[in-house]
Image (cartoon, rainbow, N blue to C red):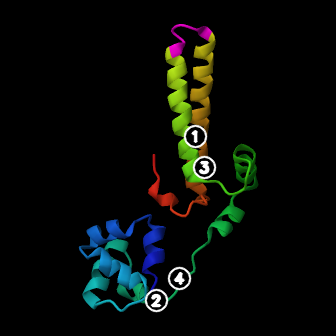
Amino acid sequence: MILKQLRMSRHLTQEQLAEMSGLNVRTIQRIESGHNASFESLKCLASVLEVNVETLQQTRLDMKTQKDLWQGAPLWVKWWFGLNYMNLTPSKRATLRAIFTCHISGYLFCLLGLVSQPALAGGVIMLGVGYFFNFCLWLGNKYSIWFDAEASQYSL
């Protein structure tokens, strides 16, 4: 069955899919591991995933891997991430950490700017870097090139 691939392509956890379909999480786990599902369970899942029951009964779905998505990204995006992350496997988790760190330190330095003008300049620079990483986050989401195993869990 292709349930896991469909669920992951829609950025849903097993718990979210279970809640939306009215099924038990254990039922979702069993179906994803290859056990047979009742027709009623398949109907509930098909409704939530907006596919027909026959699609759920297929054994395989060809989906692009992260490597294929990365290779399909425009050259300027690869260069952008390569230069800014110093690797060619961008991580959404690292980007979110950078955004958080830059914004917190930027705000703190801006507060220190009440006392010291160089601290204010540093704060403004850190906030600018934080917004730069927001742009990286947007690009990574647009081209779906994150290499985190569970990148869909992290959102801003």
Judged by depth in the image, the label closer to the viewer, 1 or 4, is 1
In the picture, residue 63 is in which quadrant?
bottom right
What residue would you read off at disc 4? 61
* SS of the residue under disc 4: loop
* Element carrying mark 1: helix
Q: Are marks 2 and 4 in contact (CB under 8 Å)?
A: yes
Of the residues under marks 1 and 3, which one precedes in the sequence?
Answer: 1
Highlighted range, magenta: 112-117
Q: Is residue 101 above or below residue 94?
A: above
Magenta span: helix, strand or loop, mainly? loop
Specify whether 20 is left or right of 98: left
Mark linked to residue 139: 3
Q: Residue at x 63, y 66 (%)?
A: 66
136 and 99: which is toward the camera: 99
Distance in Å between CA atoms under marks 2 and 1: 41 Å
Q: Residues within 10 Å of mark 1 (few under 14, many from 20)?
A: some
Q: Nearer the viewer, mark 1 or mark 3?
A: 1
13 on left or right of 146: left
